[in-house]
């Protein structure tokens, strides 16, 4: 099958389109003919040799796919060859065929294209898991969402607007993306270039109460302002550490305000646990995609032969929402 392959770790120059062995589904799995996938930041980290796939998963890049079921493994029920599906995969998305566990599948609504469906699983499920399932975000609460126009952050904004319409959203963003972020539902914007310590502006916006939830992928650099911005019983959910992994923590403040710091990853969770997350997302969030309350934001669709350009766009942070890779 046609696939993006890498012979060595490194920059975008290691990405090549070539031939790889077609996978076969084992018990509880299906084979998906992939029509589209998307570029996610962990793909870049894996390309650099710093984020290996879980044991047993494909070495090929790609964490989500949208396509049609080509074949069923043993023990699979409730699905048929030809069903349009979108799914998380542990690896293997940048290829014409990929295997996925049947408990991770979601039916693509008739209203969605394959390109739109390719955006859903990694970013929107990550946002849903960490904002609603782990972060326990409720309507009328206030959150800080770091990340401006990135895939997970735009997904989080859209999900909050659809599922908790009375909530208040503070979003940090670069100047170039602030108006687009406002356009999809941010209530208050912080230019992170001008205001790296956002404590005082958050206190002003919340009348000194602080926020209920912070979704953060920055890590060390933001730990102090994050904790200072959290209110009583606030939750800080950390999903990335792009600025570093070590920082000082004021334990007394955390104790007095009964704050929580929660670390979270999706890819390495057990198969059954990811299945439970997908089932909850399907129940609560997928109807919002079906009725077009949420429409995935696509910056650009590349063909598989343009994989280098797609990775360069993400590296240069020129995208807003998702970068899609069309396979078929």
Image (cartoon, grey):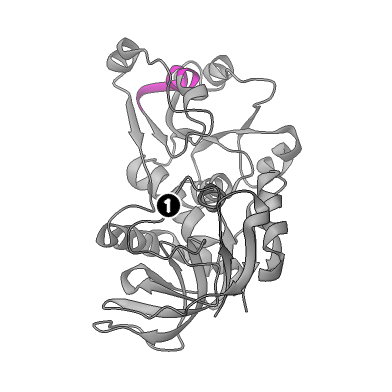
Can the viewer see residue 156 in this picture? Answer: yes
Q: Residue 120: where, in percent of width, then height?
A: 51, 61
Camera-side residue of 95 and 106? 95
Secondary structure of the residue carrying numbered label 1: loop
Q: State whether residue 177 is above or below residue 32.
A: above
Graded by Cα atoms within 10 Å as few (under 14), some (14 to 19) or many (20 or more), the crowding at tag 1 reads some
Q: State whether residue 179 is above or below residue 21.
A: above
- Horizontal placement of 278 versus 300: left or right? left
Q: Residue 173: where, in percent of width, then height?
A: 65, 34
Residue at 39 percent of width and 87 percent of height: 71
Q: Indicate whether residue 241 is drawn in magenta.
A: no
For the C terminus, which image quadrant?
bottom right
- Horizontal placement of 26 versus 23: left or right? left
Q: Indicate whether residue 225 is drawn in magenta.
A: yes
Camera-side residue of 64 and 275? 64
For the N terminus, which image quadrant?
bottom right
Q: State whether residue 119 is above or below residue 130.
A: below
> What residue is pinned by disc 1?
52
Can the viewer see residue 292 in this picture? Answer: no
Camera-side residue of 312 and 189? 312
- Magenta region: 224-234
Residue at 55 percent of width and 35 percent of height: 146
Residue at 34 percent of width and 47 percent of height: 133
């Amino acid at each position: 099958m046609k696939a993006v392959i890498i012979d060595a770790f490194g920059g975008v120059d290691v990405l090549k389109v070539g031939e790889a062995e077609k996978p076969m589904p084992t018990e509880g799995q299906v084979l998906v003919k992939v029509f589209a996938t998307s570029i996610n930041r962990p793909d870049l980290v894996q390309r650099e040799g710093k984020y290996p796939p879980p044991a047993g998963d494909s070495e090929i890049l790609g964490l989500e796919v949208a396509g049609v079921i080509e074949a069923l493994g043993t023990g699979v029920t409730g699905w048929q060859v030809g069903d349009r599906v979108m799914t998380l995969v542990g690896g293997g998305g940048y290829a014409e065929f990929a295997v996925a566990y049947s408990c991770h599948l979601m039916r693509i609504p008739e209203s969605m294209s394959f390109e739109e469906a390719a955006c859903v699983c990694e970013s929107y499920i990550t946002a849903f898991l960490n904002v609603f399932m782990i972060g326990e975000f409720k309507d009328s609460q206030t959150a800080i969402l770091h990340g401006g126009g990135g895939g997970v952050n735009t997904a989080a904004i859209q999900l909050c607007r659809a599922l908790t319409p009375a909530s208040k959203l503070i979003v940090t963003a670069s100047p170039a993306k602030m108006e687009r972020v406002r356009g999809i539902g941010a209530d208050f914007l912080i230019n992170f270039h001008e205001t790296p310590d956002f404590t005082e502006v958050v206190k002003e916006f919340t009348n000194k109460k602080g926020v209920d939830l912070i979704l953060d992928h920055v890590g060390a650099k933001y730990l102090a302002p994050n904790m200072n911005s959290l209110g009583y019983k606030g939750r800080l959910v950390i999903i990335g550490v792009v600025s570093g992994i070590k920082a000082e923590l004021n334990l007394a403040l955390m104790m007095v305000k009964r704050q929580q710091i929660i670390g979270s990853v999706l890819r390495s969770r057990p198969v059954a646990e990811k299945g439970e997350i997908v089932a909850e997302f399907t129940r609560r969030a997928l109807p919002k995609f079906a009725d077009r309350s949420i429409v995935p934001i696509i910056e650009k669709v590349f063909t598989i032969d343009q994989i280098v350009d797609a990775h360069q766009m993400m590296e240069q942070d020129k995208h807003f929402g998702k970068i899609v890779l069309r396979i078929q």
